DNA sequence: CAACATGCTAAACGCTTGTTCAGTCCACTG
DNA sequence: CAGTGGACTGAACAAGCGTTTAGCATGTTG
């Protein structure tokens, strides 16, 4: 079955409620959304929401596990698609770029990440753990490929890269406001990624003209783009 | 002349209420805190909270402007104390380190930053704007001092550095969970800062032993105090 | 056919919320 | 001393919350 995404039109009312709840939760935060609002958005009564999910807490858990499942499936594809590892622009901007590729452009999932990560709940910790594993594996593969060195503390380095990725996700609207473009948008990333990449490859001191004194990324640096995959 | 900090014991009830509200808001989010909880925490009735601040929204605004004033004063000192600029470990870990130096260790201010930045309100935008100015000025000074190069897009580079700083603030508890130490604590930063610094000075490819393959960028890049060797 | 589970709703329940109100205390002022 | 005004409170208010309940269709099963 088509895994997490169900583009069919005759979804069960349960799924409609779950998706509308996700949309509202992502936009205003779970605490600020009422059961009646969820019901109204899904075109059903508030009582039916309770009937299907038991309680508001149950609805939250259902949304959480749905989002978690979607992300874990996506993370699995991410870890697998690059084989050894995607390097350069893919590895560096992995999260933002991955979202753009794997999710519809108006998906509420990235926005819901905020509440998942900042509410201090168990789901957030679990997701962060998964992301850390991915970041750790990516860094290891880059080390093996010669495109990066493990730091004194490889785990700390992996967390550092992960936090930087997540920061763009959490604060991209602030960044867009002062920059004039959104680093998470398709064209905004074209301006953002090179800047980020230049720091990662050569540090802050390297000049733009200088491509970086590093040991020149060996294997297949040319084919960074993953196109030709319509949907 | 300690400006924002008032260590006196006979603070007005209004200030007590404001501070307790800040504490609760930072811990649970403004939306999840009731007027009765604020009153109880301050040792007064809920009605008195309304009497002093008009409404819950008024209380929020009072807390916001108080936090904003504190941060702006702190940012002003920060921009001034380094003169031209603090470099190396200070500039890199500026926000986290600055909080440790300028605020009591159990201050709710850093935690409240989350809600300020993520609620999408005007106060959050204004604070981010101030932080951006500071980051921009710091980067400019580093460029002038030779410790950094402006990127292709200096504004984007400043935002990149700022977001990385803020990420530690927003997600340090997740980081602490997978790392075993909190990057925002005093001793945790001793392990975190060198890792961050090594990426900023030499990029991801530079090895710890290798001080950086950089073009030996002229003026005073050699002197770094703390992270010279094993700690 | 009767019995029953399922999907669903309108109405109501008890509770908490932010806010209001009437009134008490108490330090000042004339 | 009478009077005024600000700090402060307990009780009450309407509104909104999550949840419960009783009941209506509809389709499936014996």
Image: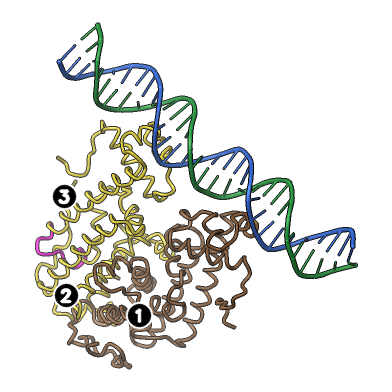
Chain colours: A yellow, B brown, C green, D blue
For residue D6, side relative to residue A228 (left or right): right
As for residue A63 lying within the magenta part, the answer is no
Q: Main secondary structure of the magenta part?
A: loop
Per the model, the C-alpha gap separating discs 3 and 2 is 29 Å
Q: Label 3: few (<14), some or many (≥20) within 10 Å?
A: few
**Quick one: B35 or B83, which is closer to the camera?**
B35
Residue located beneath label 3 in the image: A229
Per the model, the C-alpha gap separating discs 1 and 2 is 28 Å
Q: Pinpoint residue C18: horizontal percent, then vertical percent.
A: 56, 50
Residue range highlighted in magenta: A81-90
For residue D28, side relative to residue A20 (left or right): left
Residue located beneath label 2 in the image: A148
Residue located beneath label 1 in the image: B186
**Quick one: B128 or C17, which is closer to the camera?**
C17
Q: Pinpoint residue A51: horizontal percent, then vertical percent.
A: 33, 33
Q: Pinpoint residue A159: horizontal percent, then vertical percent.
A: 25, 70
Residue in the picture at 15% in, 55% down: A76
Q: Which tag is nearer the camera, tag 3 or tag 2?
A: 2
């Amino acid at each position: 079955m088509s895994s997490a995404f169900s583009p069919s039109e005759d979804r069960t009312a349960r799924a409609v409620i779950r998706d509308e709840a996700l949309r509202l939760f992502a936009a205003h935060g779970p605490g600020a959304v009422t059961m009646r609002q969820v019901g109204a958005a899904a075109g059903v009564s508030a009582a039916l929401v309770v009937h299907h999910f038991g309680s508001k807490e149950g609805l939250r858990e259902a949304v959480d596990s749905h989002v978690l499942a979607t992300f874990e499936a996506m993370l699995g594809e991410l870890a697998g698609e690059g084989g050894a590892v995607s390097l350069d622009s893919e590895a560096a901007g992995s999260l933002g770029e991955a979202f753009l590729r794997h999710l519809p452009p108006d998906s509420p999932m990235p926005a819901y990440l905020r509440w998942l990560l900042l509410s201090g709940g168990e789901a957030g910790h679990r997701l962060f753990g998964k992301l850390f594993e991915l970041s750790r594996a990516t860094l290891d593969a880059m080390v093996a490929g010669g495109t990066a060195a493990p730091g004194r503390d490889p785990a700390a380095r992996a967390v550092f890269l992960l936090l930087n990725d997540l920061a763009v996700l959490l604060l991209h609207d602030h960044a867009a406001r002062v920059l004039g473009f959104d680093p998470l948008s398709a064209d905004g990333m074209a301006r953002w990624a090179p800047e980020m990449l230049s720091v990662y490859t050569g540090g802050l001191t390297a000049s733009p003209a200088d491509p970086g004194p590093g040991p020149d990324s060996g294997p297949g640096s040319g084919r960074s783009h993953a196109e030709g995959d319509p949907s």
